[in-house]
Image (spheres, grey):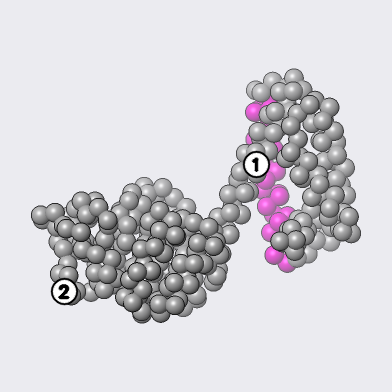
């Protein structure tokens, strides 16, 4: 890759001065990450396949690496922010010989399997790793309220936590396995979208039952208001695996779900979502959990998996 005139390019024959951090990938998010690191006073080297994207960062004080190898040589710590974990793996596998002793903080997206493959490549090459999930748009990078949730060995977090918090002040360490961050993303996405799909099915049954959508929509804040108590029940029961002191047992939920399903059926409304909830609850009761809190289904589902 050639740099355009005026770029502060590194010498391919060697690194003149080590940087604090290298950033691999200068899309909107990668650029925002690099800018926040520069704003913190850290020295930064950046690399991107399209060199012209680096020009504004060069003007802001970043040094521009001509190659991935050059970027890795420039810093002991590199932040990667590409399309996904698989793309990072494809980028780094051919230069694995340059990874020994390095620490790669991958803030790309991807699933658990892809994260594990990337970590395998890094570990085999003698590099430390961190997998992070950015919970913000690029405009939020560098702000105190922005969270980057990270998984890594504890010693890597101890070493790099301050760098992560420069890019997101509310960032935290949530696990020590590569699958921890993709798993947490899947869990949070499922919880949020569970409510969205619940509203969709709810809207459908109201339409079939002749309930005006304005009436249903006006009641949604009331329903959403119960989410806090649901979260508190989850916090009280699941971490401690204590499901015996329940205000609403599986048996109670089953009765309500049977009523709900009956209404879906009688109105001729598609009932996949409420039927799933009813069937899961019935399965828990069939396993002898009728007197337990509904959250005990976490144990049942994870055991099935």
Is residue 51 visible from the viewing direction of this image? yes
Residue at 87%, 59% (x, y): give it: 287
Q: Specify the quadrant that holds the N terminus.
A: bottom left
Number of numbered markers: 2
Asked whether 223 falls inside the magenta stretch, the response is: yes
Which residue is at the front of the view, 226 or 93?
A: 93
- Residues shaded magenta: 215-240
Where residue 228 appears, x then y in whole percent?
Answer: 67, 48
Query: Left of 165 or right of it: where is 76?
Result: left
Q: Earlier in the sequence, mark 1 or mark 2?
A: 2
Query: Left of 94 or right of it: where is 289?
Result: right
Asked whether 127 falls inside the magenta stretch, the response is: no
Residue at 78%, 64% (x, y): give it: 242
Mark 1: secondary structure: helix
Is residue 60 visible from the viewing direction of this image? no
Residue at 75%, 64% (x, y): give it: 303
- Residue beneath label 1, please? 195
- Residue beneath label 2, please? 13
Residue farthest front in this picture: 94
Q: CA distance from mark 1 to mark 2?
A: 56 Å
């Amino acid at each position: 890759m050639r740099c355009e005139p005026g770029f502060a390019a590194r010498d391919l024959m060697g690194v003149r001065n080590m940087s604090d951090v290298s950033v691999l990938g200068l899309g909107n998010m990668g650029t925002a990450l690099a800018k926040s690191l520069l704003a913190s006073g850290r020295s930064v080297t950046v690399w991107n396949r399209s060199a012209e994207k680096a020009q504004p960062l060069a003007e802001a004080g970043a040094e521009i690496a001509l190659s991935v190898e050059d970027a890795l040589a420039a810093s002991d710590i590199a932040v990667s922010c590409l399309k996904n974990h698989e793309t990072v793996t494809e980028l780094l596998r051919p230069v694995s010989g340059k990874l020994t002793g390095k620490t790669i903080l991958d803030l790309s997206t991807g699933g658990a399997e892809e994260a594990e493959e990337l970590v395998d490549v890094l570990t085999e090459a003698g590099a430390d790793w961190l997998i992070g999930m950015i919970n913000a748009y690029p405009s939020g990078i560098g702000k105190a309220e922005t969270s980057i949730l990270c998984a890594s060995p504890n010693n890597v977090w101890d070493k790099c936590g301050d760098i992560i918090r420069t890019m997101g002040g509310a960032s935290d360490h949530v696990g020590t396995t590569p699958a921890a961050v993709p798993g947490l993303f899947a869990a949070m996405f499922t919880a949020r979208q569970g409510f969205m799909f619940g509203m969709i099915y709810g809207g459908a049954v109201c339409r079939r039952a002749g309930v005006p959508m304005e009436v249903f929509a006006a009641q949604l804040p009331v329903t959403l208001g119960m989410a806090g108590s649901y979260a508190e029940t989850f916090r009280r029961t699941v971490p401690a695996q204590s499901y015996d002191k329940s205000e609403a047992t599986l048996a109670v939920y089953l009765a309500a779900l049977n009523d709900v399903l009956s209404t879906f059926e009688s109105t001729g409304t598609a009932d996949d979502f409420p039927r799933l909830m009813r069937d899961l609850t019935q399965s828990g009761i069939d396993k002898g959990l009728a007197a337990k809190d509904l959250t005990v289904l976490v144990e049942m589902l994870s055991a099935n998996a």
